[in-house]
Image (tube, helix red, strand yellow):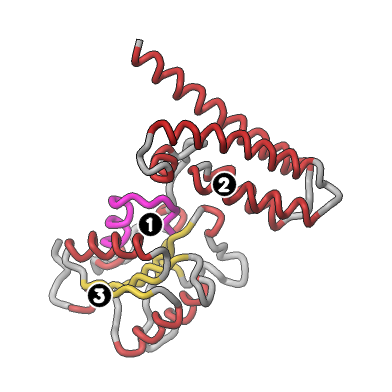
C-alpha cells in the first residue's frame, strides 16, 4: 500500500477496547505500513495528540474515563484536528441528531469487525481522497439473528460448548423476557432484566436482540418492547433449529 511521502498519513492512534483487540488491530495495520500508537483511555489519547500528529484515530465507543464521542469532539479541535473512526456495538452508535454526537465522526464500525472492513475503512480515510462513504454506509449490513462467529469465539472454538451455550442463552433469554413482561409496573426490575438480557445477547452474538434490549433498558416498561424481544428470540430459536437440521442432514 502506497501511503505517499507524508509521514503524518502513516500515523494512526488506537484508543480503548480490550488489550487483545488493540494489539490485533495494531499488528494488522503495522504490517500494512502504518505507524500505530495504542492507548487505553481518552486522557492518554489527548496527551499523545499534544505532541504527535495523526492521520486517523480509531476510538472505542466506551472508554474508561469518558465516552468515545466526547474524545472525538476534543480530537476535532484545531489546530491539530484528527478524524475519528469509532467502533462499538450496534446500540453504541452515536446519533448526529443528539447534541451533535456524531458530527465529529468520520465513520462508525459495528462489532464484530472483520479485518477486511477495518482495513478498508482505514485506507479510505487515509489515502488522501477522503471518506468515500457516509458513516451509515460503513456500518455492518443486515445481520442474521445470531452471529455464529461471535458465538464460536465465546465458546473458544469448542463445538459442544457452543451448542450448550446457545441452548443456555435461549433458556436464559426467555427468563429475562418473562421477567420484563411481569415488570411492566416495576421500572427497576424491568431495567435489571433488560440489562442482563443485553449482556447475555452480546456475549453469544444475538446483536439485534441486544440492541433492542439496550433500547428497553433506557425506556419505560412497554408491552410492545416485550413483544419485539419475544419475536427476535423466536427468530434466534428458528435460526438455531435450522442450523442443527442442516448439520444433521450433512451427516446423513
- Is 190 rendered above or below residue 123? above
Dot 3 alpha-carbon crowd within 10 angstroms: few under 14, some 14 to 19, many 20 or more: many
Q: 180 or 216, which is in the foreground?
A: 180
Dot 1 alpha-carbon crowd within 10 angstroms: few under 14, some 14 to 19, many 20 or more: few
From the viewer's perspective, tell me whether residue 248 is left or right of residue 193.
Answer: left
Numbered label attached to residue 200: 2
Spot occupied by residue 21 in the image (x, y as percentages of width and height): 35, 60
Q: Which residue corresponds to the image point at 34% horizontal and 61% vertical from the top-left?
A: 20
Residue 190: say if magenta. Answer: no
Numbered label attached to residue 133: 1
Numbered label attached to residue 88: none
- Mark toward the start of the polypeptide (3 vs 1): 3
Q: For residue 174, what is the image quadrant?
A: top right
Spot occupied by residue 102 in the image (x, y as percentages of width and height): 52, 67
Q: Which residues are magenta?
A: 108-123
Q: Secondary structure at mark 3?
A: strand
- Mark toward the start of the polypeptide (3 vs 2): 3
Q: 217 or 193, which is in the foreground?
A: 193
From the viewer's perspective, tell me whether residue 184 is left or right of residue 145.
Answer: right
Give the quarter of the figure containing the N terminus: bottom left
Amino acid at each position: 500500500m502506497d501511503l505517499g511521502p507524508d509521514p503524518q498519513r502513516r500515523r494512526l492512534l488506537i484508543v480503548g477496547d480490550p488489550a487483545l483487540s488493540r494489539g490485533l488491530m495494531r499488528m494488522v495495520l503495522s504490517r500494512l505500513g502504518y505507524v500505530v500508537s495504542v492507548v487505553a483511555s481518552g486522557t492518554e489519547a489527548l496527551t499523545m495528540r499534544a505532541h504527535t500528529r495523526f492521520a486517523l484515530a480509531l476510538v472505542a465507543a466506551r472508554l474508561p474515563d469518558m465516552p468515545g464521542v466526547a474524545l472525538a469532539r476534543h480530537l476535532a479541535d484545531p489546530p491539530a484536528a484528527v478524524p475519528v473512526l469509532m467502533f462499538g456495538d450496534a446500540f453504541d452508535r452515536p446519533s448526529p441528531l443528539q447534541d451533535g454526537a456524531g458530527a465529529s465522526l468520520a465513520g462508525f464500525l459495528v462489532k464484530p469487525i472483520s479485518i477486511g472492513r477495518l482495513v478498508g475503512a482505514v485506507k479510505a480515510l487515509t489515502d488522501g481522497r477522503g471518506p468515500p462513504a457516509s458513516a451509515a454506509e460503513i456500518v455492518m449490513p443486515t445481520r442474521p439473528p445470531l452471529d455464529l462467529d461471535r458465538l464460536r469465539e465465546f465458546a473458544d472454538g469448542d463445538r459442544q460448548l457452543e451448542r450448550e451455550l446457545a441452548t443456555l442463552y435461549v433458556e436464559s433469554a426467555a427468563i429475562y423476557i418473562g421477567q420484563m413482561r411481569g415488570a411492566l409496573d416495576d421500572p427497576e426490575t424491568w431495567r435489571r432484566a433488560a440489562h442482563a438480557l443485553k449482556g447475555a445477547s452480546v456475549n453469544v452474538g444475538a446483536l439485534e436482540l441486544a440492541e433492542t434490549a439496550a433500547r428497553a433498558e433506557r425506556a419505560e416498561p412497554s408491552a410492545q418492547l416485550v413483544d419485539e424481544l419475544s419475536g427476535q428470540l423466536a427468530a434466534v430459536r428458528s435460526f438455531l433449529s435450522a442450523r442443527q437440521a442442516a448439520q444433521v442432514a450433512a451427516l446423513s
